[in-house]
Every structure is written in C-alpha cells, then in structure tokens.
Image (tube, coloured by chain):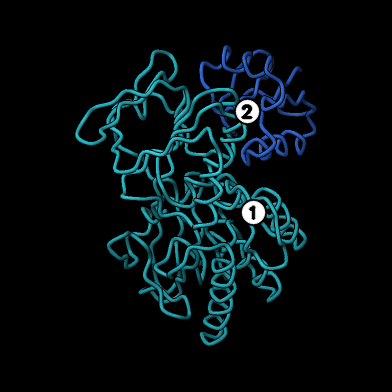
Chain colours: A cyan, B blue
C-alpha cells in the first residue's frame, strides 16, 4: 500500500521552492520531485530585478533559495522525472522514472526548457560546440569565435557573457531587430567585437568532431560563418508533456485561474509552466506561494 | 579510488554532482575548466565533447550528472 501524501510538488525552480517553503510552514506532509534545483534561474547570468538584491547571479540566488528550502528538512527526490499524472478516487497519482506516488493534492511547477532550432547538425553537435546553457558552458569557449542564436533577453544575456572572453561574437537574430531590454542592447552595442545579423535564418550546423561553422540565410543569400561555439537562445517550451489530463493553451502552458487551480480538482500549477503572464523569478515565487496556500485551503475544506 | 570532476563554477549540474559525491563521503579532485586550459583540453580529449560536468571514476568517464552511472562505478559501502 503506497503512502498517501497531503501534497506532492513537481519541480524545484523558484516557484516549486517557494511552494515547498510555504507548505513546510503549514506542516503539510509532502514531498518534492524534481530533476534539479533552481530550474532556469540556475542558468541565469546576472539578476538585477529580484527585490532585496540589487545584483546577484543566478547560481548565487539559487543557492540562497536552496538553503532556505533545506532548512525545513524537506523530502526531495532528485533527480527524478515525472512521466504521467492521473486522478483516481479523489487521489492524484504521480508516475516517475523511478516510482509511483499518491497524494491528495498536486502542485505542478515544472517550468520550461530551451527550445531547439530543429536544423541539420544541431543534435549531432550538441555538447560538441552547440550548447543551450551559456552560463554553464560559456567559459569553455574562451578565445573562440562563437554565435548566439536569438535576439531576446536570454540571447543578450549569453552574448554579454561571451563578449568578455571571445574575440568575436555573432548574434544571429531572425527578427527585424533585437527584442531584448534596451539596457542590454545598449550594453552589447558598446562592444567592438560583436556582429549583429538581423533578419537572418540559421540553416545548418556543420563540423567534423566538433562544430566548425554555421550556414545562414541572409538577404536571400546563403552565407558561411566559421566558428567553434553556438549558443541556442531562441526561447522556451513548457515542461507539460506528462500533464495530458490538464487543460493547456496553444503554447502548451497549463491553464490556471487566479488561485492557481487547474481544470482538475486538487491539482494546482504555478510558475513558468502556466499561462500566467510575465515569466519572471519574482512572479514565479509569488505564484508558488499562492499555489501552496490554495492546496492548503483545498485540503482543509475537504476535511483532510 | 580516484575521482576527478571537470566543471565550471557556474554550472548547476556540476554543483549537484560534487554535492552528491560529497554526500556519499567521497573525495574528488575538482578541475575548473574555465580557468585551467590544460584540464579543459584533457576533458575534451577523454570525453570527446565539450559539456560539463565530466566525472572520471577510476578511469571510467561519465558525461553529465548521470547518477545511475555514477552509482554503478562507486563501491557500495565505504
């Protein structure tokens, strides 16, 4: 007979961590199932808009979050990946790659993951020059020519890391202009070793053992760029593949109401995996707090 | 038992791998490939790729924080 938890939290990014702290303070009997700690925040470069810190790096902020969570002695199953969730007789079943769990309530806080380009050579050269985490792998490309694919904040974040250690940084952007915050665009324009290609589509990645170059389509002409590192920063997709029973929007985000309820009773969701606008660390934290309190309210109104 | 971890200071999975080894009571040599050019070249040569972390346990190369693989290479009790 499997144990029945009050609550299971899926994910330990800013949203899941906040939900876990609130749930621990409410003395709920719960566990956290997650692939990692920190989620996207752990990959972030510089953070200057999390209140209380004028400046903190992603890994440093995540260390603070983790300390706060571990202080409560929370049961964390990691690394463990959710495969399926379903409901049976008012109880939620969570099936993972390691085990199966039962709970009265569930909070989905599984966040988002980087989108892939879907072009020739991308999979083949993953970790052989192609990377999705500039924060992790950026330093390995010191002294090498690199390209950042994308034009939003995460692309510019990666570019700003690389301009300091690379002789030449290309920014390959499909749009008319960069869509990142002006502060970042101004910063990047102040570096002489940056080349920005707008209205440019990446066609193919090639190399031998490692990446040697990139083929792009610019002004209807194919162009070759010789380089050794490619940072893909073209946005994110929600980790909602296992959540077939939940209602999703066209972007595959879980639809929640203002109290973080999903379409299924007892299942709540929060953070970047949901349709809540503004994907920000501080927003995700607030949503995590709300989801925990909603789960708590659900438990006591159902006499558990 | 000889354990090496090739890592960068900013990589979350590197940190998790190191914490995991420490929690099991294993000591390891920590090689920061963002600073140590020689270690970086060695990592690329032995693993054939450029992602961190790379963990080497008695000559066996593990790419990424692959806990199942790490467990299979570590002795059960120390």
Q: Nearer the viewer, residue B75 or A32?
A: A32
Q: Quadrant of residue A126?
A: top left
Q: Nearer the viewer, residue A95 or B10?
A: B10
Q: Position of residue A284 (x, y in %)?
A: 54, 66
Asked whether the viewer can see residue A190, the reply is: yes
Q: Nearer the viewer, residue A169 or A245?
A: A169
Residue annotated with mark 2: B70
Q: Nearer the viewer, residue A261 or A169?
A: A169
Q: Mark 2, chain letter?
A: B
Q: Mark 1, chain letter?
A: A
Question: Looking at the image, which residue is at 65% across and 35% down?
Answer: B14
Question: Looking at the image, which residue is at 66% across and 32% down?
Answer: B8
Badge 1: few (under 14), some or many (20 or more) residues near its Cα, within 10 Å? some
Q: Position of residue A63 (x, y in %)?
A: 71, 51
Q: Quadrant of residue A87?
A: bottom left
Residue annotated with mark 1: A76
Q: Is residue A262 above or below residue A36?
A: below
Look at the numbered discs 2 and 1 and tell me whether their residues touch, using CB distance below 8 Å.
no
Q: Is residue A175 above or below residue A55?
A: above
Is disc 2 placed on a helix, strand or loop? Answer: helix
Q: Which label number is shown at residue A228?
A: none
Asked whether the viewer can see residue A1, the reply is: no
Q: Is residue A23 above or below residue A163?
A: below
- Spatial separation of the CA atoms under disc 2 and disc 1: 19 Å
């Amino acid at each position: 007979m499997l144990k029945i938890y009050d609550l299971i939290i899926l994910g330990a990014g800013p949203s899941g961590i906040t939900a876990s702290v609130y749930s621990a303070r409410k003395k709920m009997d719960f566990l956290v199932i997650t692939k990692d700690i920190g989620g996207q925040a752990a990959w972030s470069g510089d953070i200057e808009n999390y209140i209380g810190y004028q400046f903190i790096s992603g890994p440093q902020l995540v260390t603070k979050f983790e300390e706060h969570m571990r202080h409560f002695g929370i049961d964390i199953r990691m690394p463990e990946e959710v495969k399926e969730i379903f409901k049976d007789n008012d109880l939620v079943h969570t099936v993972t790659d390691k085990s199966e769990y039962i709970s009265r309530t569930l909070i989905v806080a599984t966040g988002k993951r980087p989108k892939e380009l879907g072009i020739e050579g991308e999979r083949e050269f993953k970790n052989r020059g192609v990377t999705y985490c500039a924060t992790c792998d950026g330093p390995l490309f010191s002294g090498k020519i690199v390209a950042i694919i994308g034009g939003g904040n995460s692309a510019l974040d990666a570019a700003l890391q690389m301009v300091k250690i690379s002789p030449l940084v290309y920014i390959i952007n499909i749009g008319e202009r960069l869509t990142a915050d002006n502060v970042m665009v101004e910063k990047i324009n102040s570096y002489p070793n940056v080349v920005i290609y707008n209205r440019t589509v990446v066609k193919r990645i090639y190399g031998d053992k490692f990446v040697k170059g990139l083929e792009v389509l610019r002004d209807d002409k194919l162009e070759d760029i010789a380089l050794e590192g490619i940072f893909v920063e073209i946005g994110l997709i929600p980790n909602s593949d296992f959540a077939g029973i939940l209602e999703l929007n066209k972007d595959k985000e879980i639809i929640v109401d203002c109290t973080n309820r999903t379409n299924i009773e007892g299942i709540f969701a929060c953070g970047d995996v949901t349709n809540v606008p503004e994907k920000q660390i501080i927003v995700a934290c607030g949503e995590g707090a709300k989801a925990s309190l909603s789960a708590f309210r659900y438990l006591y109104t159902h006499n558990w | 038992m000889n354990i090496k971890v090739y890592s960068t200071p900013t990589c979350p999975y590197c940190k998790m791998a190191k914490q995991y080894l420490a929690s099991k009571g294993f000591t390891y040599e920590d090689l920061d490939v963002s600073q140590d050019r020689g270690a970086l070249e060695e990592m690329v040569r032995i693993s054939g790729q450029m992602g961190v972390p790379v963990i080497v346990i008695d000559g066996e190369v593990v790419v990424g924080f692959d806990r199942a693989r790490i467990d299979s290479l570590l002795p059960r009790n120390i």
